[in-house]
Amino acid sequence: MLRLALTLSALVAFGGGARADEFGVLKVAPGVEETFYNCTACHSERLVAQQGMTREHWADLMVWMREEQGMHEIPPDELDTILDYLAEHYGEDRPNFPY
């Protein structure tokens, strides 16, 4: 019974099932899942979290990774979600830098 209560508490606390550590150091917020799984296909999420760029710079980096590094094509709607997430949580002010 205690285990069920703890599981239900975690579901409520982390928005429907995302554990705090499920996405490594990335901030759990809308867009984290798409960002985590697309980015960690090639590198650690820490590399993402250490950056601090504008949305435009993130977009330019995505183009570079696709054209020069062979990154897979991300559907436009999913790419917008990822860019929105990155710009909000890993922008120039670096509000979620993992110290």
Image (cartoon, rainbow, N blue to C red):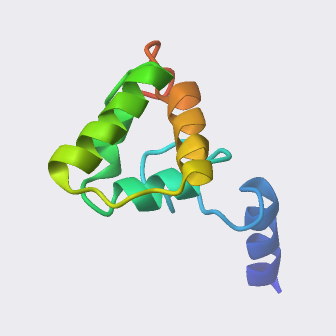
- x%, y% of residue 2? 79, 80
Q: Is residue 54 left or right of residue 47?
A: right
Q: Residue furthest top?
A: 93
Image: 49 above or below 40: above
Q: Residue furthest left?
A: 68
Q: Is residue 7 left or right of residue 93?
A: right
- x%, y% of residue 25? 43, 46
Image: 19 above or below 3: above
Q: Is residue 24 left or right of residue 33?
A: left
Residue under the image location 45 percent in, 22 percent down: 56
Residue under the image location 73 percent in, 64 percent down: 10
Image: 11 above or below 55: below
- x%, y% of residue 26? 47, 45
Q: Is residue 82 left or right of residue 1?
A: left
Quadrant of the drawing holding the C terminus: top left
Q: How many marks?
A: 0
Residue under the image location 58 percent in, 41 percent down: 80
Q: Can residue 98 be seen? A: no
Quadrant of the drawing holding the N terminus: bottom right
Q: Which quarter of the figure has residue 33?
A: bottom right
Q: Nearer the viewer, residue 69 or 14?
A: 69
Q: Nearer the viewer, residue 42 or 11?
A: 42
Q: Can residue 52 be seen? A: yes
